[in-house]
Image (tube, rainbow, N blue to C red):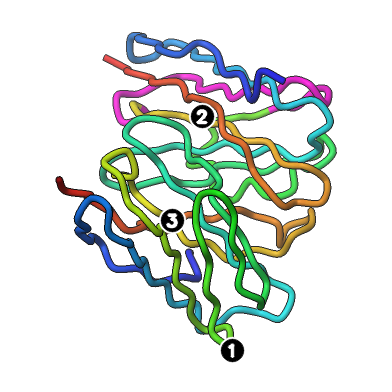
Amino acid sequence: DAGVIQSPRHEVTEMGQEVTLRCKPISGHNSLFWYRQTMMRGLELLIYFNNNVPIDDSGMPEDRFSAKMPNASFSTLKIQPSEPRDSAVYFCASITGTGVVAFFGQGTRLTVV
Amino acid sequence: DAKTTQPPSMDCAEGRAANLPCNHSTISGNEYVYWYRQIHSQGPQYIIHGLKNNETNEMASLIITEDRKSSTLILPHATLRDTAVYYCIVRVAYGGSQGNLIFGKGTKLSVKP
C-alpha cells in the first residue's frame, strides 16, 4: 500500500482565495483525521471522521474551514476564504477499525500570502 | 487538551539508551498509551503502544507503571536518526468521539555524537 496520500505537497495562494487540500486514506481504514501544525500551536486536531461521518469537528477553527469525506477513499479540507494565519502544515491520518495504529501522510505545506 | 505531560527536551549520547518519560495520571482503564515520533517536517510515525503490560518491538520498549499513571519509552541504542519530537498519547482503541488522537507538545530528543 502506498500509505496515506496527500495532495498537493505544497500550496501557495493569495489571501482570500479558496484552498482545497486532499487526502486518500489507506484502503480499509475507516477513521480519518485532519491536523494542522504550526510552530506556535503544535499539532492540532481539526476534525475526525469515522465511517465517513464527522465525529468531532470541535477543532475546526472557524466557519471558513470545512471538511468532507464523500466516500471511504477520499477526504477534502477546504478553506474559504484563506487568510495568512492559515499558513501551516496540514496532515491527514487514517486508522483501522480496531483503532490501534494511525498512519500519517506527508502533509501539505500551505502558505497564504 | 492532551492528557499527558512530557519534558520539553532531552539529550542523549549516540549509542546509549534514551529513556523518555510520560505522565498520564488521569488515564482511564480502557485507554492505551501510544508513542509516536515526528522527524523534522515529516508526518508523525507510530512507535509502540500498550495497555498495562510492558511491550517491546523492533523500534523500542514501553514500560508502564503498575498504577498506569506513567510510562517510559526506551530506545535501547539511540542513533542520530532518532533525533525527533516524541509524543506520548493516551487513547481508547476504538472509534467514536473517544477515539480522538490528541497530541501534546512532546519531547524533543536530540541524539548527539
The residue under the point 81% across, 51% down is A98
Q: Is residue A84 magenta?
A: yes
Identify whether A43 is placed above or below A89.
below
Residue A74 in percent (x, y) is at 74, 20
Q: Which mark is residue B87?
A: 3
The residue under the point 35% across, 23% down is A83
The residue under the point 50% across, 77% down is B24
Check the residue under mark 2 and report the chain it is in. Answer: A
The label nearer to you, 3 versus 1, is 1
Horizontally, residue B28 falls left or right of residue A73, namely left
Amino acid type at circle 3 is Tyr
Amino acid type at circle 2 is Arg
Which span of residues is magenta-colored? Answer: A68-86
Check the residue under mark 3 and report the chain it is in. Answer: B
Identify whether A70 is placed above or below A54.
above
Q: Indicate the quadrant containing the C terminus of chain A: top left, top right, bottom left or bottom right.
A: top left
Residue A49 in percent (x, y) is at 73, 40
Check the residue under mark 1 and report the chain it is in. Answer: B
N-terminal-most mark, 3 or 1 = 1
Label 2 with label 1: CB-CB less than 8 Å: no
